[in-house]
Image: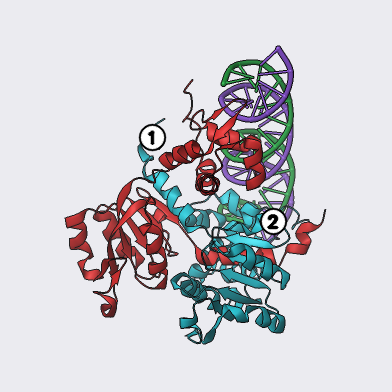
Chain colours: A red, B cyan, C green, D purple
DNA sequence: TAGATTGTTAATCGATTAACAATC
DNA sequence: TAGATTGTTAATCGATTAACAATC
């Protein structure tokens, strides 16, 4: 019955948030029931993959009927632990930091922003989403007092080695990394999810300049 | 000899920008020569994969020697078309838009930012990296006059359907998409590279909350 | 020349898709 | 019951790794 949970690959996990978004949308449109076939059409996937993916986590559907949208939405939310409020700090309160803060600040993101730090004296004291920006010098004491577990990195790569060494020493266990510094190579013991904006843009550059060749047989 | 260029998969392409960054770093540190073995150690990959990847594009190395760093850096830059200056417009000049603009504005990104648009009247006329923010009402005429080929989307998903229909009609051929609207589903004829920030954060949430199970045999 | 390291093919591994029995 | 659709296994496809001959 419950031989699930033993084959969850990273590729499946990376698809879960997209399922979650699509199901939220269906739910908001009052759709209660959906088959893997119809969901596949809407998402541009195969029905087979959808059933395979969902089945990693348990029997979410019902033969002859399909899937109950609100229930499936809820279940995937649970799998993603969106209800968690992991204590999170943000390093770097520039444009990127502010943009990213609003994503973390959303309810049901799985994280709760508790501190914001920047090395720029001029913005220390300003408020972002009701949280004061502190000077980076206060980072160590803040962590000792508040025990955040996740750090969001929105600064350039230059000073990253010292900063990550410090953060790991202070008990940070996972990183949402927007810098190009390779945290995972230096600290294999922590969890790192990186968003490499320039890499994404360069991939687009390659693809944009090689569209014709790609279409040949 | 040149039976290359026939097996370039998307997974290889997605690794190229990271190679490019690592090689730039090596070059800046005055390193002229590197073997696949040493590069593999530095990047956390296998030597086999590195040779396989580079070989998709041609014989970049030399048996018994390895790879010439500045040369390989240059070659990968060419493959990624970093020297191109594809005319690009930015839609949405909030924090995210401003952060992203600075990435596009970098020399050698493959793109050149020529116009910025926002629906907020208050910020129309302000300058970002020397480019004036225009009200979104001027988008259509701007495109007719200037023929941008790429659009960067930094607005919420709400009004995306009309906007992307318009942009595609005006000749936009590729999108760097930060919204959750699924451009590729609606317009399969254009190229879309999406950065889904909330998806990335949710993936981190899953992984952060399932670290112990993952380590079991 | 001997040693090193690539280029390239073959073997392995993993992910996706197809098929169909189970069952609602 | 008959029809629909899942859960699940097997087949296929693609990507990574291993191996080694080619060659600098």
| Residue found 41% across the figure and 39% down from its top | A78
The circle drawn on residue B56 is 2
Q: Residue A163: percent from the left, percent from the top? A: 30, 64
Residue A124 in sight: yes
Q: How crowded is mark 2: few (under 14 residues within 10 Å), some or many (20 or more)?
A: some
Q: What element carries label 2?
A: loop
Chain of the residue on which disc 2 is drawn: B
Indicate the position of residue B9 as horizontal and vertical percent values: 67, 52
- The one nearer the camera, A175 or A100, is A100
Q: What is the chain identity of the residue bearing mark 1?
A: B
Q: Is residue B164 left or right of residue B156?
A: right
Relative height, residue B120 to residue A172 (above, below)? below
Q: Tell me how far mark 1 sits from mark 2, CA to CA.
A: 38 Å
**Left/right of residue B174 with respect to residue A163 in the rendered view:** right
Going from N to C along the chain, the mark reached first, 1 or 2, is: 2
| Label ID, residue B213 | 1
């Amino acid at each position: 019955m419950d031989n699930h949970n033993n084959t969850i690959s990273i590729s499946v996990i990376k698809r879960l948030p997209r399922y979650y978004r699509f199901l939220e949308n269906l739910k908001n449109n009052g759709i209660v029931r959906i088959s893997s076939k119809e969901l596949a059409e809407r998402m541009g996937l195969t029905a087979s993959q959808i059933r395979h993916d969902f089945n990693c986590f348990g029997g979410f559907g019902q033969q002859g009927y399909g899937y109950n949208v609100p229930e499936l939405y809820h279940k995937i939310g649970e799998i993603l632990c969106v209800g968690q409020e992991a204590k999170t700090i943000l390093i770097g309160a520039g444009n990127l930091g502010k943009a990213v803060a609003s994503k973390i600040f959303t309810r049901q993101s799985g994280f709760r922003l508790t501190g914001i730090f920047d090395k720029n004296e001029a913005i220390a004291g300003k408020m972002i989403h009701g949280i004061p920006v502190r000077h980076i010098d206060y980072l160590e004491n803040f962590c000792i007092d508040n025990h955040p577990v996740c750090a969001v990195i929105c600064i350039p790569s230059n000073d990253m080695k010292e900063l990550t060494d410090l953060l790991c020493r202070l008990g940070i266990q996972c990183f949402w990394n927007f810098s190009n510094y390779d945290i995972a190579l230096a600290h294999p013991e922590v969890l790192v999810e990186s968003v490499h904006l320039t890499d994404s843009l360069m991939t687009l550059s390659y693809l944009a300049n090689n569209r014709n060749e790609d279409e040949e047989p």
